[in-house]
Image (cartoon, helix red, strand yellow):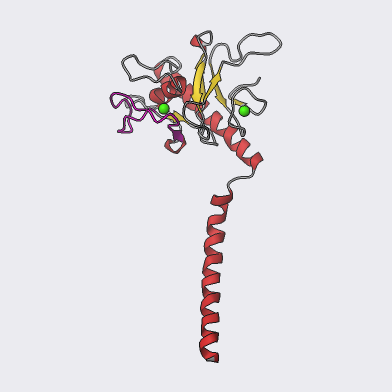
Amino acid sequence: MKTQSGFTLMEMMVVLVIIGILAAALFPKISGLPAQAKVRAAKSRLDSISAAIESYRTTEGEYPTDYLPTGLALNGINNRSEALFLALFDAEYTGQRPSEEWLVNTDNDEATRNLTSLGTRDLFEIGDAWGNPIVYFDSLHYGDRRVTTVMRDIEYGDENEVVPHRNPKTDSYSAPNSFQLVSAGPDGEFGTDDDIYSFKQ
Ligand SMILES: [Ca+2]
Ligand SMILES: [Ca+2]
């Protein structure tokens, strides 16, 4: 009886050790990065996408358009983010690209045909560190209407509108001759103080 009980205890200890090892291995992924580190990661992601956009300009002679091609099934949401995705993942484009792991599709839409090198019709957005679409503004269209975005953690149809950033002192557009990338930041909402930009405000 005593031997039986001791053996069970040892089994339990072995199981606990295994659980401990698994927990240690999985913990960083479960807990995620601390908030500050995540903001830094988000900024460096914007830098990386900016570099890809500059690479596109070098290769193609102009910045990617933030207009979707005509003839796609359009839902009017995430358009400018999706246009950037289509440009940088175009099968013909040979320059620098953002990581495929950053792609999200918060409005779950598809193009009427396959337009990218990925072999799928998904109209992806390039997501920020919190899985929300990064909004892209081509300076040619700053004056055009605002863009509507669906955020990851809110119900479909609960829209978040974004406009290009302006210098609060001069009221002129920031990055007037290039482009703007905007992440909604940790709060997942555009137009608040924690928004992250690809340029100096
Ligand atoms: Ca989409
Ligand atoms: Ca925000």
Stretch in magenta: 103-123
Residue sitting at x 55%, y 60%: 23
Residue sitting at x 54%, y 36%: 129
The residue at the far left in this view is 113
Residue sitting at x 56%, y 24%: 182
Compared with 58, 49 (above or below) is below
Compared with 120, 24 (above or below) is below
Which image quarter holds the C terminus? Answer: top right
Q: Is residue 118 magenta?
A: yes
Q: Nearer the viewer, residue 64 or 34?
A: 34
Total tally of numbered discs in the picture: 0
Q: Toward which corner of the image does residue 67 lie, by quadrant?
A: top left
Q: Toward which corner of the image does residue 58 lie, by quadrant?
A: top left
Q: Is residue 136 magenta?
A: no
Residue 166 in the image, given as x and y percentages of width and height:
63, 13
Residue 21 in the image, given as x and y percentages of width and height:
54, 65
The residue at the far right in this view is 169
In this rendering, position of residue 178 left or right of residue 71: right
Residue sitting at x 60%, y 45%: 33
In this rendering, position of residue 19 left or right of residue 97: right
Q: Nearer the viewer, residue 127 or 199?
A: 127
Picture quadrant of ligand 2: top right
Residue 177 in the image, given as x and y percentages of width and height:
55, 11
Q: Main secondary structure of the magenta part?
A: loop
